[in-house]
Amino acid sequence: MAQTRLESARMPGAEDPAGRRGEKGGGMAGKRLKAVTGVLARQGILVAFALFLIGFALGSDRFLSADNIFSVIRASAIIGVMALGVTVVVIGGNLDLSVGSMLSFSTVLVVDLHDKIGPGPAILVTVLATLCLGAVNGVLVGVARLNSLIVTLGMLSAIQGLTLIYSGGKNVDIANPDGTWFSLFGRGYIADIPTPIVIFGLAAIVLHVAMAYTPFGRRIYATGGNPTAAVFSGIRRSRVVFSTYLISAFTVAIAAVILGSRVMGSQNNVGQGYELQVLAGVILGGTSLLGGSGTIWKTVIGVLILGFIQNGLLLLGFQYYVQWLVTWVVIILAVWLDIAAKRGRLLSPIA
Amino acid sequence: MDNRLKALIAGSTAMAAVALAGGASADQMKIGITQNNVGVDSYQTTYEKAFIAAAKANPNVDVVVLDAGGDVARQIAQIQDLIQQKVQAIIIWPTNGKAVVPAVKKAHDAGIPVVITNSNIAKQGMPFISAFSGPNNIEQGKEAADMMCKALNDKGQIVQISGKPGYTTAIEREKGFEDQLSAKCPGVKILDTQPGDWNREKSQRVMEDFLVKYPKIDGVYAADDNMGVGALNAAKAAGRAKDIKFVGATNFAVGYEAMKKGEYYGSVYQSPVDDAENALKTAIEVIEGKKVPKMNYFKTPEITQANMDKFKKPVF
């Protein structure tokens, strides 16, 4: 009885669970102005995104064509879906660096099994196997309470090894890419929208609702924000952390199905380095690496920024090494704009 | 605990000594190999299997097969181990062309001939090696350019998807291709070059961007078939595959299949089996004191839809 269940305290419809609210306005006009700057401050990353889009659109007339926009979002969907899951883990106060090699594993598995047991069972087995890997992360970090950085970094190479043992180092391919309904996930369309975009959108909506409006989401924010306080509030920390890793593994499985279907084959190291792109998208979306704050839909924006930068720079005809540099500059600018908007000035008032 | 450990060390040392003595007493060639990263791709996996098979087939040869797992430090340690074991020749598949040079020099100073396999070491290491055995990547780039010229009748505009930036193989293929293209058919222009990182998905993404950027593309050169098929995927999705000729390198099974379907123009056939057998043969000839060309290339012929029935489907 002494323990208050946290969800009873939540504000229904709270837009920002991290709790960045509370502008105190003066008069009517002042209030409106404050409201506008307040919105700008909260959505700094969105402003940055809009600015990039305008910049690239001025430089290349093909940038804003429907074809290009669809193509970029479709290509970003793989990183994007994984980033959604990792956002949940990070909000819960942990990291997941194993998603890249987990993606390699799951893609090799689903592609290899496709020709052996058919697409349906292949997807089912892949999802279950990937959830098992996520469960290993979850047990080690959630129950055994080991450092998530070490655990998932170890899992990164362990899963890579597992993939190589499974495949014997060989590439796997789907023998007849044109004659399988498996092609729906990476190459197909649902209501004229490419399926990867539909899946990405649905996953984002489901996870956003779960994180922002359900007791389950609240518990993850509470655990990431202050684990000790969360435990004293009656939250079963280990169970919450465990579930975040299951969510991230599940999103990896979805990404693997999209990737396998898009490429119709897989290399053993296909996801190598993707964990960093995923993390970049999450951080760009403003999710704090310390846990307890962040939003799903901003991760979507973060991932799209990365995708559109790479695409835009290529369309503008930059050499790849210039692209790497400019990507870095753009990320710094975006993060800076986000932070500057939040504190209302460019440089920190505290020296 | 302590005693057990001591016993273990003593035991293993004794065993190693016996093994060494056994090896030394027999009238046999002992050859050591340290590979780059077996298991990371089918090429290297097949290479190792073929190497071991070729060594088994020759009763006069004993091989010590090691793998650096892509780790430079481990490879240097393995080279030092092989020097200690007094093998008669060391074959190295460098993890890094520059970093292994001091270790190669050490082997050379110890009087052990070194054969480099598959991808060459940096220039400053060349005086310390007996031979390089492997594919000629500049030549492969040229072959691809020849095929591209033929496919486009010496006229058109193409895009290039190169390998991972910084890799010798990527640089050499790109150079060979570009030089030969401008020499043989200046009517074919390269619109753009972007790296595909040897990754099919990355290449697919790059090609999607190219297709948006250029309304007319006549040909694609990809530095390996994996990336070539990625580009083909993207062009098919955009409904433009029929207007584009695809030329790759290092013929993969997927490239072979696509060629069979008539979707893929041609590639360069590079067999890991030939690669491995050539390396072992080079090392044996070096030990026997035969004259071996310093750059001992094995053949990597052109493969196109026209002549593909002469080649077996690649195992990778």
Image (cartoon, coloured by chain):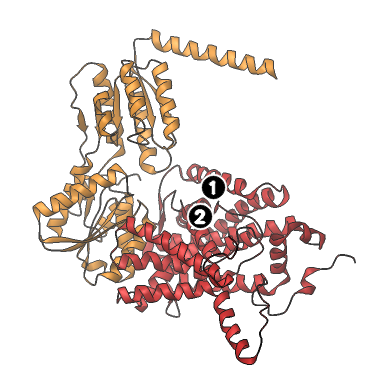
Chain colours: A red, B orange
Q: Are marks 2 and 1 in contact (CB under 8 Å)?
A: yes
Q: Which mark is residue A275?
A: 2
Q: What residue is disc 1 on?
A: A156
Label 1 marks which chain's residue? A
What amino acid type should be assigned to the residue bearing mark 1? Leu
Q: Residue furthest bottom?
A: A28
| Residue at 79% from the left image edge and 74% from the top image edge | A8
Q: Nearer the viewer, residue A293 or A258?
A: A293
Callout 2 crowding tier (Cα within 10 Å): few <14, some 14–19, many ≥20: many
Q: Height in image: B199 above or below B279?
A: below
Residue at point 61% right, 67% down?
A294
Do the dots labelled 2 and 1 sit on one chain? yes
Marks 2 and 1 sit apart, C-alpha to C-alpha, by: 9 Å
**Quadrant of residue B87 within the rendered picture:** top left
Residue A328 to residue B176: above or below: below
Residue A323 placement: quadrant = bottom left
Q: Earlier in the sequence, mark 2 or mark 1?
A: 1
Q: Is residue A34 visible to us here?
A: yes
Instruction: Residue A2 in the image: state x and y as whole percent.
Output: 89, 65
Residue A137 place in picture, x, y as percent? 63, 51
The disc numbered 2 marks a residue on which chain? A
Hey, which residue is sitting farthest right in the picture? A1
